[in-house]
Image (tube, helix red, strand yellow):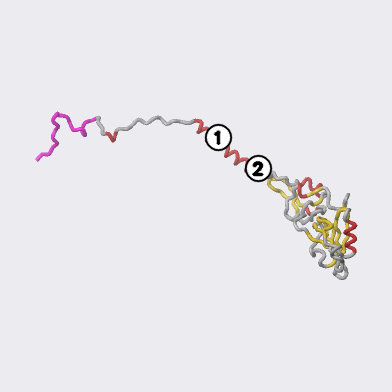
Amino acid sequence: MRISEKPSQDGRAPAAERPGLSGPASRKLPVPPRERKPALAALAVLLILGGALATTLLVMRSGDRVSAVQIVEQVNAGQPVPKSALREVEIADTGIGYVAWRYSDRVTRTYAAVTLLPGTLLTEQMVTARGDEAGPGKAKVGLALKAGQMPTDLVKGDLVQVIYVPAQGRDSGSAQQRVLAPAARVAGVGLPGRTGSSGLVSVIVDTSVAPTVALYASSGEIALVELPGAG
């Protein structure tokens, strides 16, 4: 038995067999041309070039080295800065105002404005042209203190308060404890006396209170209180 499609009544072939015809799924809508934005493209190129330039400058900058002054031994505040406390080191040029090594000779003619610790890179603010030696308006007073009247670890350059402490037996109404010098610099610390019960300390105070400090020191009525971190 022969099987064949029945031709259409109008004699035309079925739609699937007609050449040149397609279904709705095969029809494509026209695509508009892609819009180009030259301004955005140019901006992207500039950003890429700018980033590359900044990276290059940072790499080149990190290679710049300068000679600076480093502290290698402790210098207490108020003390002259010795040559032995200085060392030349090479550091990256970060823009911070470290003292250049070529000025090291000038540094040895200055005094420590603060306590300089080993390993510190020196800046101009850490030194001063004048120390705390006795000058106009200042006087150096020597004290012979007993145990308990001063800290045991006191060193030159420390900042202390000079306090009047009335001796026992004085009339407490007429003699009260008071601060004679709120901030005096220690100019020197000697060895304890032969008995081991006293120590010699020199302090820089204002000339206005120097006679009073000396008077009370002679009667053993002076005590020193250290001001840690103040100098």
Please name whichever residue, 88 or 22, is drawn nearer the observer in this view of the structure: 22
Is disc 2 placed on a helix, strand or loop? helix
Instruction: Report x, y in % for residue 89.
Output: 73, 50
Quarter-wise, where is residue 144 in the image? Answer: bottom right
Query: Which quadrant of the figure contains the C terminus?
Result: bottom right
Q: Earlier in the sequence, mark 2 or mark 1?
A: 1
**In the rendered view, would you say 72 is above or below 46?**
below
Check the image and report above or below for 198 versus 122.
below
The answer to whether residue 97 of the structure is visible from this angle is: yes
Measuring from the top left, give residue 46's x and y in whole percent: 55, 35
Where is residue 62? Give x, y as percent: 65, 45
Residue located at (64% from left, 42% from top)? 60
Q: Amino acid at mark 1?
A: Leu
At x 70%, y 48%, the residue is 91
The residue beneath circle 2 is: 61
9 to the left or right of 72: left
Instruction: Single out the mark in the foreground, 2 or 1.
Output: 1
Residue at left offset 53%, top offset 34%: 43
From the image, which quarter does the N terminus lie in?
Answer: top left
- Is residue 14 part of the magenta span, yes or no? yes
Q: Give the image quarter of residue 156.
A: bottom right
Q: Examine the structure image and report whether residue 184 is included in the region drawn in magenta.
A: no
**Type of the residue with mark 2:** Arg
Chain part drawn in magenta:
1-19
Q: Circle 1 is placed at which residue position?
A: 46
| Magenta: main secondary structure | loop
